[in-house]
Amino acid sequence: RLYPVAWIGVTDQPDSKFDLHLNNGRLLEHFHEGNLTYRTDGIREKAPDTFVEVSPELAEERGIQSGTWVQLVSRYGQVRVRALVTDRVQGRELYMPMNSVESPVNRLTSSHTDPVTNTPAYKEASVHMNVLHEVGESPLPHINSRFGHPTPQNGVEVERKWKRPDYAPPGNGLVQLQTKS
């Protein structure tokens, strides 16, 4: 049975003090906070640390280049990360991956939830960005696929895996689940 719910507006709108909207989510290279992927050779080198994506227009307005350290401050906390200037975000929108133990994006998010579903409002984060005028290297190295060096693969190519000397096909140790018909 379906029940209509009432619209509840955004709880954390940008204002004069917290003037930017921060979105967050995953990275292609890392699952969740990188609990396992940060231990995998090759993956961490492509996306070694967290960062905040800043639009070219906001970067120009605030004097930011890729690698500039910034401090993001919300009503709930603060983090220090490097900026990545990219056209993947526009205007006063920011994007921060949720793959850091040292500067987790959830320090900036509220504990508001939808009263019916209890879904957290993690995408509703308004922040202020302090430019620290300390410039480091770009948070994404030149080997990252965003810089035009993708390594495409046609399908899964399991045959290549089967030919590897370290591959062993699953044997009797594999648990097979049987269903009753």
Image: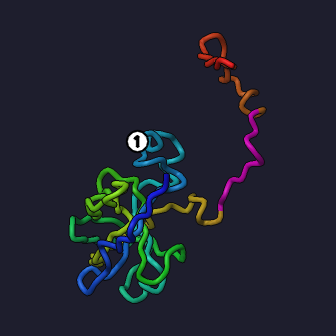
Given the current orientation, which residue lies at the most extreme bottom position?
61
Q: Tell me: 52 left or right of 150.
A: left
The three-letter amino acid code for the residue at tag 1 is: Asn
Query: Can the viewer see residue 159?
Result: yes
- Name the one closer to the observer, 111 or 6: 6
Given the current orientation, which residue lies at the most extreme top position?
172
Query: Can the viewer see residue 105?
Result: no
Q: Quadrant of residue 15?
A: bottom left
Residue that badge 1 annotates: 35
| Figure coloring | rainbow
Q: Is residue 153 magenta?
A: yes
Question: Residue drawn 21% across and 65% down?
Answer: 76
Q: Where does the image place residue 160, in percent across and percent down from the top left?
A: 76, 34
Q: Where does the image place residue 58, in percent across and percent down from the top left?
A: 42, 84
- Name the one closer to the observer, 45 or 51: 51
- Name the one closer to the observer, 111 or 127: 111
Q: Quadrant of residue 35?
A: top left
- Name the one closer to the observer, 167 or 173: 173
Vertical placement of 6 versus 57: above or below?
above
Vertical placement of 92 versus 116: above or below?
below
State whether the magenta stretch is mostly helix, strand or loop.
loop
Image: magenta residue range:
149-158
Q: Count residues near mark 1 (Cα–Cα under 10 Å), then give few for <14, some for 14-19, many for 20+.
A: few
Q: Tell me: 144 left or right of 25.
A: right
Q: Where does the image place residue 25, in percent across and percent down from the top left?
A: 45, 59
Judging from the image, what secondary structure is the residue with disc 1 in? loop
Q: Quadrant of residue 12?
A: bottom left
